[in-house]
Image: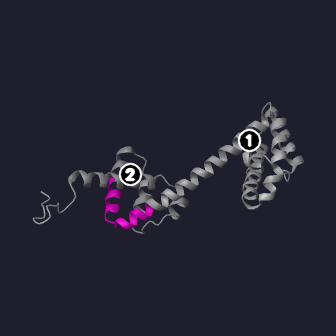
């Protein structure tokens, strides 16, 4: 029994349902931590005593053993202060937003690359060069030709990857310029839409 305060009528401790929900939240957080890479974990404010348990959970691949290790990790996490767990959650949500933005930017670059390599590649190249007049036209056109040549000869996709890198840098410069210099965006017209 939880017991009640005679004066206020409030319960002394959380209900079993509340305790179970809190335990499941911690277990879910443990699963998320175990799914992160070492670099991602290093960015989070994880207490030192939890790191060995997280690494051990990552190491285990057997379903039953992993499930037991996750339960053990959650138990160790529940021993931490609520502030420590909240700090981890906050850091993960910020990191998650940044990751989503990076992923969306990567997808835009991939879509642009696919358009440049498709049937409407010439029109897409014209639009790209109009939106980014500082771009190296000759290099971009050469990379597109190299990708087509690679595909014809079944060669490794070196130029394909290089085209992606070049477009990613170009798009990043375009985002920086549109945020920094209002005059450039007036001259380029479509830069904010591309």
Q: Report if residue 145 lies within the magenta region.
A: no
Q: What is the number of the mark on residue 28?
A: 2
Q: Which marked residue is nearer to the observer: mark 1 or mark 2?
A: 1
Dot 1 alpha-carbon crowd within 10 angstroms: few under 14, some 14 to 19, many 20 or more: many
Between 54 and 40, the one nearer to me in the picture? 40
Residue 146 as seen in the image, left or right of residue 179: right
Where is the N terminus found, in terms of image quarters? bottom left
Q: Are marks 1 and 2 in contact (CB under 8 Å)?
A: no
Estimate the x, y position of residue 121 in percent, counting from the top left. 81, 35
* Residue 41 seen in render: yes
Label 1 element class: helix
**Residue at figure coordinates x 42%, y 68% from the top left:** 47
Farthest residue toward the left? 6
* Residue 146 seen in render: no
Dot 2 alpha-carbon crowd within 10 angstroms: few under 14, some 14 to 19, many 20 or more: some
Label 2 element class: helix
Q: Which residues are magenta?
A: 71-88
**Residue at figure coordinates x 40%, y 55% from the top left:** 29
Where is the C terminus found, in terms of image quarters? top right
Mark 1, residue position: 112
Compared to residue 137, the image places residue 26 above or below, namely: below
Estimate the x, y position of residue 176 in percent, counting from the top left. 73, 58
Estimate the x, y position of residue 81 in percent, counting from the top left. 34, 67
Residue 68 as seen in the image, left or right of residue 126: left
Compared to residue 104, the image places residue 41 above or below, namely: below
How far, Cα to Cα, is label 1 from label 2?
Answer: 37 Å
Between 91 and 51, the one nearer to me in the picture? 91
Estimate the x, y position of residue 2 in percent, counting from the top left. 14, 59
Farthest residue toward the top? 119
């Amino acid at each position: 029994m939880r017991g009640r305060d005679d004066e206020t009528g409030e319960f002394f401790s959380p209900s079993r349902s509340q305790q179970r929900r809190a335990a499941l939240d911690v277990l879910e957080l443990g699963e998320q931590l175990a799914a992160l890479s070492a670099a991602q974990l290093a960015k989070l404010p994880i207490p030192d005593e939890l790191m060995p348990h997280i690494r051990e959970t990552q190491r285990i691949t057997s379903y039953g053993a992993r499930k037991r290790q996750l339960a053990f990790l959650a138990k160790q996490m529940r021993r931490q202060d609520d502030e420590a767990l909240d700090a981890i959650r906050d850091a993960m949500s910020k990191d998650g937003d940044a990751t989503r933005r990076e992923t969306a930017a990567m997808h835009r670059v991939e879509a642009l690359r696919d358009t440049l390599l498709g049937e409407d590649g010439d029109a897409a190249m014209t639009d790209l060069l109009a939106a980014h007049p500082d771009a190296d036209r000759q290099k971009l056109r050469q990379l597109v030709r190299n990708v087509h040549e690679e595909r014809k000869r079944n060669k490794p996709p070196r130029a394909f990857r290089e085209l992606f890198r070049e477009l990613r840098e170009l798009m990043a410069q375009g985002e920086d310029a549109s945020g920094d210099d209002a005059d450039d965006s007036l001259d380029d017209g479509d830069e904010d839409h591309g």
